[in-house]
Amino acid sequence: MKPLHQLTYLSLLFLNKLICSLSKRRRYKLSIYISKLFFNLIPIRKNIAKKNIQKAFPEWTENKINLVLKNSYNFFCYNLIQFIGFPKTLEQVKFIVKGKNIIDRYLQNGNGIIMVTGHYGAWEILGKWLGEYAKLFTGIAFKQKNLGAHHFFIEQREYFGTKHIFTREPLEKMYNVLKKNGILGIVSDQDAGKKGIFVDFFKTPASTAKGAALFHINRGSPIVVAVCMRTGFDRYRIEFIPIENNGKNIQSITQSYTKILEEYIKIYPEQYFWFHRRWKTNLK
């Protein structure tokens, strides 16, 4: 590992210890301070996020757009502090879970589950719950260029039992999760370039990865959308929504789960990660 990567890893370990030493209230106050710092002085991708919100909600006023953007900074700074402080930061977190019976019923069929989510809500906490609940929960993830950050992030997630397969690894590994009646987690809401399929996302065509639909068509495993929303201070609501489309049409399957995610974003728009270039690839 390069010296810079080693330094990154050690720095993140130090932050973990520091965050764990703070009370819940102090962690929250720290997140507010950091969010204000980024919002006002280090506006990385701030304009991209604002334009995305405007595209999704063209009827909103400038004041409402700015308020949602500011609240989004607050939300994700607190998410990040919680994640770095795993497992200490989750000791008093409370969950309400809707649709757990769907997970149980599908797993009884023995064909695994394709679990689709997006960069919405507290997806790391969702992974924590699934890692503890399921006998085998494996997420498809990108490998970070900075190996120090990569190792730290993977360790934080795998503490609760989550496993990982990386995007450039053989597809056979992913299919094996389903063959073993496991849950295969896919985050499917980023621009997929020219190789993606275009579906409507807030009434605008967006290139979306085909993976979830192809796994379903080739394997027959059911698709379930999963979301984890923060409903109060350290209070979360997890919901599982089955995709009833059992056909062979990649377009309709992808549109089905994209539409479900969109409807949840409308409930808590500040909990969506607007900083991605979601509509980067144009439909031609």
Image (tube, rainbow, N blue to C red):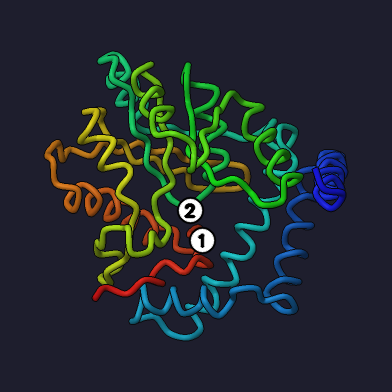
Residue type beneath disc 2: His
- Residue 44 in percent (x, y) is at 65, 73
Q: Describe residue 198's horizontal placement relative to residue 86 as left or right.
A: left
Do the residues bearing badges 1 and 2 touch, measured as CB atoms within 8 Å?
yes
Residue in front for this viewpoint, 52 or 100: 52
Q: Position of residue 187 (x, y in %)?
A: 44, 46
Q: CA distance from mark 1 to mark 2?
A: 6 Å
> 130 or 98: which is nearer to us?
130
Name the residue located 25 percent from the left edge and 64 percent from the top edge. Answer: 200
Q: Looking at the figure, which quarter contains the C terminus?
A: bottom left
Query: From this viewpoint, is residue 48 visible?
Result: yes
29 relative to 136, above or below: below
| Residue shown at the point (72%, 75%) measured from the top left | 42
The residue to which callout 1 is attached is 273
User: Which residue, given by chain and number where applicable, does mark 2 sit on?
Assistant: 119
Asked if one can make out residue 231 in the rendered structure from this viewpoint, the answer is no
Q: Which x, y percent locates residue 96? A: 47, 34
